[in-house]
């Protein structure tokens, strides 16, 4: 909870009671502080129709109500800070920058049922009565007043484009405030504001148009007013960025640093004339899942970086039509469209203990097999389409929670026969080593014990199967042992683990190898080895064979974000053919993969979870 005040501001708005100024004067007065916090309460509440406004809510009443004391003591009632932070540095994020603002976007003040003050951002939209604004559904509250292009250097009575009391709210009746379920797709609202003197809002500041995005991938400019605690300049910000789909929801997401609380409701412009009319085309607004941001505490770096918006569809434009006509209809229960296939959320993926890539289902892309902490096993089938952003299309549960798989400690996919699906090598907690010659949607087939339970194999830290012996099958097992020894066992299906080639004698350096995966990164005759070291350095060893390692290429330096890569798997996830994509499960539960990894490094991260 934050107190929203600035020590150098002392203007007393109470002295303005009874004063009506349609437009701000040219005189710059000492400003009243504005709130510095998140959008309204995360509590679920039924959407209001007219209960938050009354006939006496005029400009004069708004000036009397929104005193310096009320504004400066406004608090942040957000309930987002409920999950322990898990941090990692990310490779890239766009960054919001301060600017002077545009007159069609401003701040929206209001109070909740407990009379706690808060604010959001909002933008004007074109309408017949020239009096509509658009914001987030969770921003609807009582005593609402819209301040276009809010100027922190002026008191409320002298704002350059006046203040505009909310007369009526229009919210989808099935929306649940700040929910994390499907109804968060409906986090948008319109408000009709009252006439200010003889002026109507759109006549003074212009009106933005609305458009239905064709997909979740768009170039946008997001505008909003972050809280003053994180925004000492007390100015609006804008971020030019690219959207992508939020899995499992009819929503978009952007990755842009600086989107702190207060930007809720802020418009997402697909086109913007900021130098001329100050208006543009809106295709989204800050809102959606959890009120428009991930379910993490403010201390988590993702709190101010990841922002959501509903993807406008039929219900949005029906509400827009209703708002223009002054109607309050009920379109019935919300039936979200079938979303694209999703891997799930970060909370679930924090429970991923092991993962391996392979051609288990016979498709053109690699599949991903995941063993979870609870002993369940999931097979994610590679997608048949060509969209690199959608590498998987279905999931199959191969084992339930509590199964024997809770005792698996290392796994790798491999190809052990010339025909049929890929299989899996497993090192169990007791040291037993098992080969499942084939794995598919129905489960594990042709189990073969390669080593009996024994203390020796309990020391096998990480394993990966590849083409290290020059053949066409990925049936050579490379093992990094706890003491830093590196061994290669060629032709598993024929030799089992009886024939060992020692590539590295016990070496302290290799005790720091936390993750390994065989891939085809350099185009050599044998597989390459990708190693993620404890300190974040990541290395490719090209053309590994029974004679050992032949050079190395560093693709990530020490102390890089890859220190937080808890699981890695190389495969053909993008559909380009080669096994040169690297999928990563990060320590915060996020999942992403890198296309076409080679000696020059990683290229084109695709976020899959988070």
Image (cartoon, rainbow, N blue to C red):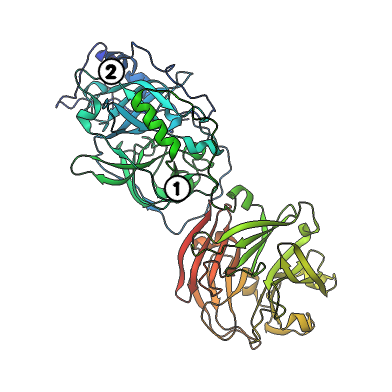
Q: Secondary structure at mark 1?
A: strand
Q: Is residue 456 left or right of residue 539?
A: right
**Which sits in the foreground, 408 or 32?**
408
**Which sits in the foreground, 417 or 222?**
417
Question: Within 10 angstroms of label 1, few (less than 14), some, or many (20 or more) residues?
Answer: many
- Numbered badge on residue 531: none
Q: Is residue 427 left or right of residue 305?
A: right
**Circles 2 and 1: CB distance less than 8 Å?**
no
* Residue 323, image quadrant: top left
Q: Position of residue 487 (x, y in %)?
A: 70, 80
Residue 83 makes an appearance in the image: yes
* Residue at image coords 85%, 69%: 453
Q: Secondary structure at mark 2?
A: helix
- Judge depth for marks 2 and 1 and give the one in front: 1
Question: Within 10 angstroms of label 2, few (less than 14), some, or many (20 or more) residues?
Answer: many
Q: According to the image, label 2 marks what residue?
A: 13
Residue 2 makes an appearance in the image: no
Q: Position of residue 434 (x, y in %)?
A: 79, 71
Q: Position of residue 223 (x, y in %)?
A: 33, 41
Vertical placement of residue 444 versus 342, above or below:
below
Vertical placement of residue 229 versus 501, above or below:
above
**Which sits in the foreground, 586 or 358?**
358
Instruction: Single out the residue that lies furthest toward the left.
Output: 26
Measured in 3D between alpha carbons, the distance from the residue under mark 2 to the one under mark 1, in whole angstroms, is 38 Å
Q: According to the image, label 1 marks what residue?
A: 253
* Residue 225, image quadrant: top left
* Residue at image coords 74%, 71%: 438
Which of the two labelled residues, at mark 2 and mark 1, occupies the earlier sequence position?
Answer: 2
């Amino acid at each position: 909870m934050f107190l929203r005040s600035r020590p150098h501001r002392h203007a007393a708005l109470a002295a303005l009671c009874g004063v009506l100024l349609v437009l701000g004067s040219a005189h710059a007065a000492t400003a009243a502080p504005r709130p510095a916090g998140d959008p309204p309460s995360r509590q679920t509440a039924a959407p209001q129709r007219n209960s938050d406004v009354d006939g006496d809510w005029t400009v004069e009443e708004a000036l009397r109500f929104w005193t310096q004391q009320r504004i400066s003591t406004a608090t942040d009632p957000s309930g987002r800070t409920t999950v322990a932070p898990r941090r990692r540095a990310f490779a890239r994020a766009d960054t919001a920058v301060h600017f002077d603002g545009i007159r069609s976007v401003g701040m929206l003040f209001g109070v909740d049922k407990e009379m706690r003050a808060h604010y959001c951002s909002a933008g004007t939209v074109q309408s017949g009565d020239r009096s509509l604004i658009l914001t987030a559904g969770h921003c609807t509250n009582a005593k609402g007043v819209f301040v276009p292009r809010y100027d922190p250097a002026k008191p409320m009575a002298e704002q350059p484009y006046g203040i505009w009391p909310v007369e009526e709210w229009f919210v989808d009746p099935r929306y649940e405030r700040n929910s994390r379920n499907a109804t968060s797709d409906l986090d948008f609202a319109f408000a009709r504001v009252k006439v200010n003197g003889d002026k109507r809002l759109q006549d003074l500041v212009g009106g933005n148009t609305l458009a239905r995005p064709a997909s979740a991938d768009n170039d946008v400019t997001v505008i909003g007013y972050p809280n003053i605690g994180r925004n000492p300049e007390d100015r609006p910000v804008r971020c030019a960025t690219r959207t992508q789909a939020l899995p499992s929801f009819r929503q978009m997401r952007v990755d842009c640093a600086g989107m702190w609380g207060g930007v809720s409701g802020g418009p997402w412009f697909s086109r913007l004339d900021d130098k001329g009319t100050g208006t543009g085309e809106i295709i989204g607004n800050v809102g959606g899942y959890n009120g428009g941001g991930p379910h993490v505490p403010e201390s988590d770096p993702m709190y101010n970086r990841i922002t959501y918006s509903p993807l406008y569809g039929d219900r949005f434009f029906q509400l827009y039509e209703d708002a223009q006509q002054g109607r309050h209809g009920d379109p019935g229960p919300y039936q979200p469209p079938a979303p694209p296939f999703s891997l799930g959320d970060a909370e679930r993926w924090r429970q991923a203990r092991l993962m391996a890539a392979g051609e288990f289902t016979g498709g053109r892309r690699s599949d991903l097999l995941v063993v979870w902490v609870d002993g369940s096993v999931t097979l994610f089938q590679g997608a048949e389409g060509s969209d690199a952003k959608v590498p998987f299309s279905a999931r199959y549960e191969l084992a339930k929670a509590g199964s024997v798989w809770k005792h698996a400690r290392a796994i790798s996919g491999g190809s052990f026969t010339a025909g049929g699906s890929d299989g899996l090598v497993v090192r169990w907690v007791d040291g037993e080593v098992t080969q499942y010659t084939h794995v598919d949607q129905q489960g594990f087939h042709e189990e073969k014990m390669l080593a009996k339970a024994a203390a020796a194999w309990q020391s096998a830290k990480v394993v990966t199967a590849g083409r290290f012996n020059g053949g066409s099958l990925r049936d050579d097992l490379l093992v990094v042992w706890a003491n830093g020894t590196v061994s290669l066992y060629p032709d598993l299906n024929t030799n089992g683990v009886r024939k060992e080639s020692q590539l590295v004698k016990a070496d302290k350096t290799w005790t720091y190898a936390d993750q390994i995966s065989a891939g085809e990164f350099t185009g050599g005759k044998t597989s390459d080895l990708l190693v993620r070291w404890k300190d974040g350095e990541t290395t490719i060893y090209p053309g590994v064979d029974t004679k050992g390692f032949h050079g190395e290429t560093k693709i990530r330096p020490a102390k890089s974000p890859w220190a937080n890569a808890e699981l890695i798997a190389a495969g053909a996830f993008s559909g380009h053919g080669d096994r040169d994509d690297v999928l990563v499960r990060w320590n915060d539960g996020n999942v992403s993969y890198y296309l076409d990894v080679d000696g020059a490094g990683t290229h084109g991260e695709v976020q899959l979870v988070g």
